[in-house]
Amino acid sequence: AINVASYCVTLTKLKSVIRCKRPGLLNRGAEFLEDNARPHTERDKKVHILHLRWRRLGHPAYSPDLAPSDFHLCLH
């Protein structure tokens, strides 16, 4: 089972891998899209995302017209 602690460890490992494979990507600012699963919505995880300096793209609750990856385009 995935809990908040294991999810945060995975995100930290992901940042290390990105830093090694695509170093310039993190300098431009990373955007992070996730669904509304319980480990993704907990406060500790949200604080961890801020600590990683990633911008979190919110996932719509349900939208028959938009794919989640396109949802943030409507906010600009």
Image (spheres, rainbow, N blue to C red):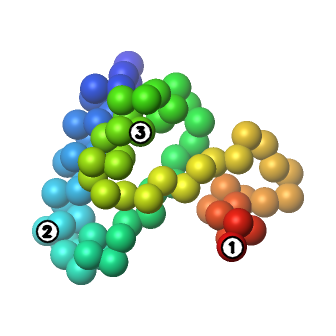
Is label 1 in a helix, a strand or a loop? loop
- Residue depicted at x 47% and y 35%: 40
**Percent from the top left, x then y, of residue 13?**
20, 48
Report whether 48 appears left or right of 59. left
Residue in view at x 38 percent, y 35 percent: 45
| Label 2 – label 3 distance at C-alpha | 24 Å
Question: In screen coordinates, is 57 left or right of 16?
Answer: right
Residue matched to label 3: 46
In whole angstroms, how far apart are the C-alphas of marks 2 and 1? 31 Å
Q: Amino acid at mark 3?
A: Lys
Counting other residues with Cα less than 10 Å from the Cα at mark 2, is it few (<14), some (14-19), or many (20 or more)? Answer: few
Quadrant in the picture for residue 74? bottom right
Compare marks 1 and 3 and give the one earlier in the sequence. 3
Q: Is residue 38 above or below residue 67?
A: above
According to the image, label 1 marks what residue? 76
Expressed as whole percent of the image width and height from the top left, the position of residue 17 reads: 19, 60
